[in-house]
Amino acid sequence: MRVGTTDDYLKRMRERYRQAATKREKGRLLTELCSVLGCHRKAAIRLLNRPATTPKRKPGRPRVYESPAITALKVAWEASDESCGKRLAPQLPALLDALTRHRELAIDDCLRSQVEHMSAATIDRRLAPIRLQLPRRPTSHSQAHSVIQRQVPIRTFGEWAEATPGQVQADLVAHCGVNAAGAFVVTLTVVDVATGWTECRAALTKLKDRVTGAMHVARTSFPYPLTSLHTDNGGEFLNDALFGYCTREGIAFTRGRAYKKNDQAWVEQKNGAVVRRYVGYHRYQSQEARDRLNELYVWAGLYGNFFQPVRKVIEKERTGAKVRKEYDEARTPYQRLKASGVLDEATAKRLEQKYQALNPVRLRAQIAAAVRAVVATAEPRYGEASSALPVDEDRAAEGGALGWGTPPERGSGR
C-alpha cells in the first residue's frame, strides 16, 4: 500500500473509530486495521488515537536568496577573481557599482539589496557547487656581495607590525622551467606591506643592472613615494648597483635573515598569488616573452590594486599549539591607500578617475588574453600551455574589439 493511500485509509479509520458507540464495534475496527496493515493490535490502537498530522516543514531557516540573487553573486564573484567570502562580502557594494556602471550586470534595487546583505558564510556556501566545477590551476642560487651585505641591516618579521605606506618588499620569480641553467626571464615583484599595492616587472636575466632597472620602473609606477626597500639575501639585490640606487634616491635598504622566508612573507605570498597564478612554471627566455609578461602585469596590476581586496591580521592569540588569528575587514589596496592619507589631492583625484573608468570584467578578459599571449612564448620542451586562468574567448574578443588591446597609461610619480 502506498504512503498516500495509507494516510487516507488511516484518516477514514480514525473517524470511524472515534464515532464508534460500543467497545465491540471498536474491536472490529482494530481487527480490520491489523489485517489490512499487518501491524500489532497495540500499534493499531496508537495509530487510531494519534491526532491528524500536518506536513512538517523542512528543518532549518527558510531559503532567502533565490536563483536571480545567486546568478548576480556569481557574476560579481567571477569579476573579483573568485575571491573567498570573507574578502568578497565587504567589497560587494563597490563591485556591484562598477559592474552596473559598465553595464556588465543589470539588477533592480531589491535584488541588489539581497546580494549586498549576504554574509561571508552564505557566499561561500552558495558558491561551493560552482567552485567544484573550476579547473585546477597550475630555485635559483646567487651569492651576495659580502661588503654590501654587511652594510645592509636585517629587518625581521616582527618589525613589520607598524609598517607605513611606502615600505615595500621585493623578490624575484625565476621563469626557468625545470632547468636553472642559461639565461631566462625573471619577474620582480614589489609589494607595499601597509596597503598591499603590488607592482610586477619582467626583466631578461637577473643581472644587477637589469634588476635595478626593473626596480626603478616598478618604483615609478607606485602613486606615492617609496621610503624603504626590503629584500632577501640574493646577489641580484645585495650588490653595488641596487644599493647605490637606494642610497641616491633616499630609500632605506634592509634585508631578511638567511633561510627565513617569513621575514619577507608579504612578497612571497604575492609571488604565488599573482605571478605563478597567471603564468605558471614554464620557461621563458626570449625578449618577446619579457614584453608579453610586462603587458600582462599592467592589466594584473590595475585589477589587483583596484579590485582585489586583502585582509590583514590584527591580532593573534595562542592557546597551546593552536593560534587563533583575527583579521580586519577586507579592503582593496586602493581603498587602504585612500584611507592612509598619504596621497596629495591631485594624485587622489587622478586615481579616483582611473578607478571610475576601470571595468573589472573587461580587465579579467584582458588578463586572460595576455596570459594566452605569454604562454604562447614559453619554451615547448618545458611543458604544455598553462591553464592558470579560465578564459572566456567571446569576452576576450569583445574586449579587444572595444579598444582595450593597448594597455592604458600607468600612474607615474614616486
Image (cartoon, rainbow, N blue to C red):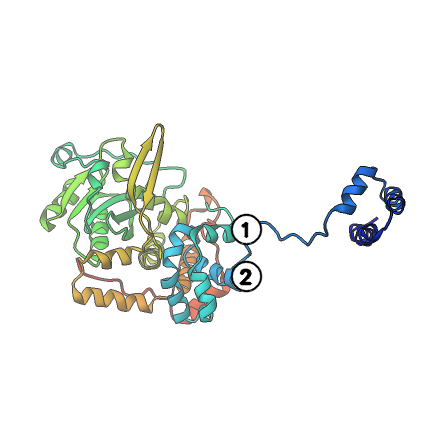
Looking at the image, which is closer to me, 30 or 266?
Answer: 30
Inter-mark Cα distance, 2 to 1? 15 Å
Tag 2: amino acid: Glu
**Callout 2: SS:** loop
Does the rendering let one see residue 284? no
Above or below for 343 versus 47 = below
Occupied quadrant, residue 38: top right
In the depicted structure, whether residue 320 falls above or below residue 399: above
* Amino acid identity at mark 1: Pro
Name the side, left or right, on which 45 lies relative to 235: right
Q: Which residue is mark 2?
A: 66
The label number, if any, that marks residue 129 in the structure image: 1
Foreground residue among 355 and 8 = 8
Dot 2: within a 10 Å radius of its alpha carbon, few (fewer than 14), some, or many (20 or more) residues?
few
Q: Position of residue 24 (x, y in %)?
A: 89, 44
User: Where in the figure is residue 287, as x and y percent of width and height?
Assistant: 33, 53
Q: Is residue 301 left or right of residue 118?
A: left
The quadrant holding residue 341 is bottom left
Which residue is pictured at 76% across the width and 46% down the height?
49
